[in-house]
Image (cartoon, rainbow, N blue to C red):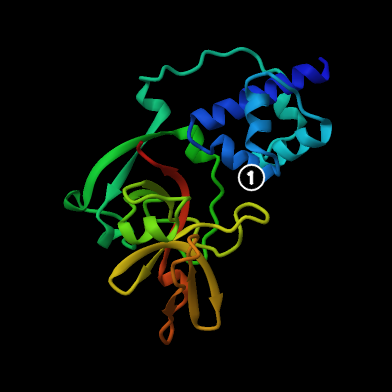
Amino acid sequence: MVISDLQNRLRDILRERIEAGELTGTEMGIRAGFRQAHISNFLNGRRGLSIEAMDRVMEVLRLDVTNLMPEPRRRAPEASDPAAFDSVPLVAAGALLQSDFSLAEIVEYLHFKKSFLRRMRPEMASQRRSWQRFVLMKTDKDSGVAMRPRLLPGATLLIDRHYNSLNCYRRREPNLYVVKSGESWKVRYVELQGNLLTLRPQNQECALGYVELGRGETFADYVVGRVAHISIET
């Protein structure tokens, strides 16, 4: 095996992650510190990567060199095989901090690959092991505008409710959270300052928001979970 074989395998893995909706080529470029054209050229086989550049891509994808080694051929599950997918409920906003949901609170189910969901690392700041882990919600106009261009109104968010820690999931990249603020649900970057949760927008034209913690409360009482995947219809 030569370096070009490892690069081809890395290219295939990156394509698979993009096709599975885990990230986009633009996000890959931002996280690895490349221009979008650099990633596009690599994916289309028009250029290779230096060893240093490969390391940066592999760090973002959480891979090591053993992941690029060939594996024994095995039959991939059919796309129609229900055993390969989990059904994740899209729920009414008012139910987001409940451990489970009634049929009336579930709008519909969407399907995600089990392999995709299992790769996600949980980190709970409060005990939620009995909670339905993954749920979906639709972005409202407020959050769509506040988090533009990362979000748009009507985007479907996959929320990992077993990740309500404020520690970064990826190094040097702030987590995006769904947070209860009064009677509404905000999608924001979150910081804890004393007894205040600061809700920070992406759009600099929008104001900061705040949630004041009451006596005996912690931030985990308000943080629904980490936004793990964003689907925007075009």
Residue 195 x %, y %:
50, 83
Q: Report whether 181 appears left or right of 188.
A: left
Residue 28 x %, y %:
62, 39
Residue flagged by tag 1: what amino acid is it? Ile
- Where, by quadrant of the figure, is residue 35 drawn? top right
223 w.r.t. 109: above or below:
below
Question: Which image quarter is the C terminus in?
Answer: top left
Q: Camera-side residue: 62 or 18?
A: 18
The answer to whether any part of residue 128 appears in the image is no
Q: Camera-side residue: 194 or 142?
A: 142
Residue 219 x %, y %:
47, 73
219 w.r.t. 57: above or below:
below
- Where, by quadrant of the figure, is residue 12 drawn? top right
The answer to whether any part of residue 33 appears in the image is yes
Q: Residue at x 44, y 77 (%)?
A: 210
Question: Which image quarter is the N terminus in?
Answer: top right
77 w.r.t. 222: above or below:
above
Residue behind mark 1: 30
Q: Report whether 211 appears left or right of 108.
A: right
Q: Camera-side residue: 96 or 156?
A: 156
Residue 230 x %, y %:
43, 44
